[in-house]
Image: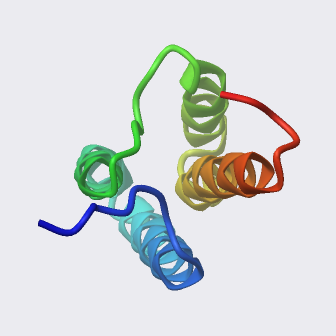
Amino acid sequence: MPEEKKGLNNTTIALMVSVALFYDVLQILLSYILMGWFIIPIAYLTFFVWFRIHGLKFLSMKRAPTLGVGAFLEIISAGIIPSITFTVLRISLDSKLKKLTSVLGIIKK
């Protein structure tokens, strides 16, 4: 059986960020009828599963500050700031950076 590759490639990151941006735009549009909050659990569940499929954790204690800042931005801006996109971009680029540094031998596991 071939070894599974864990991590995200550039195409997957671009697709994740595009989907997150779609969720943020949809949330802004639904905020006008006071239903923008409905998108947040759907988005987080989507990315929780998507990151798990690729062998990464979306929700963890290490990522709590990133998710906390995203949740705080959602609350204070009523969904106007694209915090879902920022959160997904931050987590995916963090995983990509760790993969790159491990390949280059900068950080040892």
Name the quadrant of the N terminus: bottom left
Colouring scheme, one of rainbow, by chain, secondary structure, one colour: rainbow
Q: Nearer the viewer, residue 80 or 42?
A: 42
Residue 107: image quadrant is top right
Q: Is residue 80 visible?
A: no
Q: Nearer the viewer, residue 68 or 28?
A: 68
Residue 30 is left or right of residue 88, and the answer is left
Residue 6: image quadrant is bottom left
Name the quadrant of the C terminus: top right
Q: Residue at x 28, y 61 (%)?
A: 4
Q: Which residue is drawn at 47% across and 58% down?
A: 7
Q: Residue at x 54, y 32 (%)?
A: 71
Q: Residue 47 in the image: x percent, y percent?
A: 34, 54
Q: Which of 39 and 10 is in front in this view?
A: 10
In this figure, what is the number of numbered marks? 0
Q: Residue 84 in the image: x percent, y percent?
A: 53, 54
18 versus 85 height, above or below: below
67 versus 32 height, above or below: above
Q: Nearer the viewer, residue 2 or 17?
A: 2
Q: Which residue lies furthest to the top in this view?
A: 61
31 versus 108 height, above or below: below
Q: Residue at x 42, y 64 (%)?
A: 27
Q: Is residue 2 visible?
A: yes
Residue 40 is left or right of residue 15, and the answer is left
Q: Residue 22 in the image: x percent, y percent?
A: 44, 78
Q: Residue furthest left?
A: 1
109 versus 73 height, above or below: above
Q: Residue furthest right?
A: 106
Q: Residue 94 in the image: x percent, y percent?
A: 69, 47
Q: Residue furthest front?
A: 1
